Image (cartoon, rainbow, N blue to C red):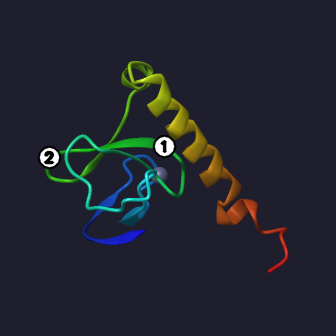
Amino acid sequence: MIILEHSSTCPKCKKHLDAVSAVDGHDRVPVENDITLCSNCSTVLIYEKDLSLSEMSDEVLETLDPELKGQINTAKDFLKRFRPNENSNLPN
Ligand SMILES: [Zn+2]
């Protein structure tokens, strides 16, 4: 995971997003059209030219490569399991 100098805000839940992790393990600063997930609400997001984030529409999501869609779904499942409010009953 890397901390970003330029943080962004999730357009759906308004969470301040200031760090990213790449699915391939080669962390780098995101660029335009990179896909990411909100760590708070798991919404699929895309980086704009100014590195602000937009929500990816279901129509665009359906056009993605099946392997990429699989990676996105795996990451969404991972995030849902580790949301703080869903771990409140787990031992510390
Ligand atoms: Zn969000």
**First along the sequence among labels 1 and 2:** 1
* SS assignment at label 1: loop
- Percent from the top left, x then y, of residue 1? 42, 68
Q: Identify which residue is drawn at 21% across, 53% down.
A: 51
User: Crowding near pointer 1: few (<14 within 10 Å), some, many (20+)?
Assistant: some
Q: Nearer the viewer, residue 52 or 66?
A: 66
Q: Residue 29 falls in which quadrant of the image?
A: bottom left
Residue type, label 1: Thr
Q: Which residue is tagged 1?
A: 43
Q: Which residue is tagged 2?
A: 49
Quadrant of image for the C terminus? bottom right
Residue type, label 2: Lys
Q: CA distance from mark 1 to mark 2?
A: 19 Å
> Is the residue at mark 1 in contact range of ligand 1, meaning its CB lies under 8 Å from it?
yes
Compared to residue 88, the image places residue 83 above or below, namely above
- Percent from the top left, x then y, of residue 69? 49, 30
Q: Residue 64 falls in which quadrant of the image?
A: top left
- Percent from the top left, x then y, of residue 68? 45, 33
* SS assignment at label 2: loop
76 sits left or right of 87 in the view = left
Q: Identify which residue is drawn at 64% across, 45% down.
A: 77
Question: Mark 1 near mark 2, Cβ–Cβ under 8 Å?
Answer: no
Q: Identify which residue is drawn at 14% across, 46% down.
A: 49
User: Crowding near pointer 2: few (<14 within 10 Å), some, many (20+)?
Assistant: few
Residue 64 — which label?
none
